Image (cartoon, rainbow, N blue to C red):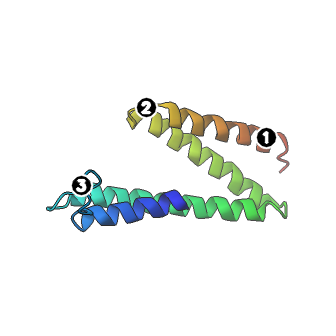
């Protein structure tokens, strides 16, 4: 949630024309395509984080819907990890995301009963 909020704020700063702090973001013309992508990514991260928080909270009362949501959530992060590896300058964060969510997915699948 914090990462999503920071991305949204950063994107809005870029859309507003930069922060004026030298070395941070100082583009007087602004860069709307970059700012729009950052805001959109921030909103996506915030939505996925909210979904993850809801899923984690609902797992306290084990039911089928919460388990299915957890499986889909981990699968979504596996896909995002692969995308991250493909487009990022360094694959290490993507590998970490895949490793953590794969371990969670294995644990969920081993205890999953339909």
Task: Write the residue at 72% across / 37% down.
Answer: 103
Distance between mark 1 and mark 2 Cα atoms: 28 Å
- Which residue corresponds to mark 3? 22
Mark 2 in CB contact with mark 3 (< 8 angstroms): no
Task: Tell me which label, 1 or 3, sits earlier in the chain.
Answer: 3
**Quarter occupied by residue 60:** bottom right
Under circle 3, the secondary element is loop
**Residue 42 x/y as whole percent:** 44, 59
**Quarter occupied by residue 110:** top right
- Which residue corresponds to mark 2? 90
**Residue 44 x/y as whole percent:** 47, 59
Q: Nearer the viewer, mark 1 or mark 3?
A: 3
Left or right of 21: which side holds 66?
Answer: right
Task: Write the residue at 76% across / 55% down.
Answer: 67
Task: Tell me which label, 2 or 3, sits earlier in the chain.
Answer: 3
Task: Tell me which label, 1 or 2, sits earlier in the chain.
Answer: 2
Distance between mark 2 and mark 3 Cα atoms: 26 Å
**Residue 72 x/y as whole percent:** 64, 51
Under circle 1, the secondary element is helix
Q: Quadrant of the N terminus?
A: bottom right
Number of residues whose C-alpha sits closer than 10 Å to that of mark 3, classed few (under 14), some (14–19) or many (20 or more) = few
Residue 107's disc number: 1
| Front-lying residue, 80 or 46 | 46
| Front-lying residue, 5 or 86 | 5
């Amino acid at each position: 949630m914090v990462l999503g909020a920071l991305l949204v704020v950063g994107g809005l700063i870029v859309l507003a024309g930069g922060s004026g702090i030298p070395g941070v973001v100082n583009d007087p013309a602004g860069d709307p395509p970059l700012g729009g992508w950052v805001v959109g990514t921030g909103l996506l991260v915030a939505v996925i984080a909210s979904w993850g928080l809801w899923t984690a909270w609902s797992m306290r009362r084990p039911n089928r819907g919460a388990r299915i949501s957890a499986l889909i959530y981990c699968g979504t992060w596996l896909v995002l990890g692969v995308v991250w590896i493909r487009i990022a300058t360094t694959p290490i964060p993507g590998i970490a995301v895949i490793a953590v969510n794969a371990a969670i997915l294995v644990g969920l699948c081993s205890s999953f009963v339909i």
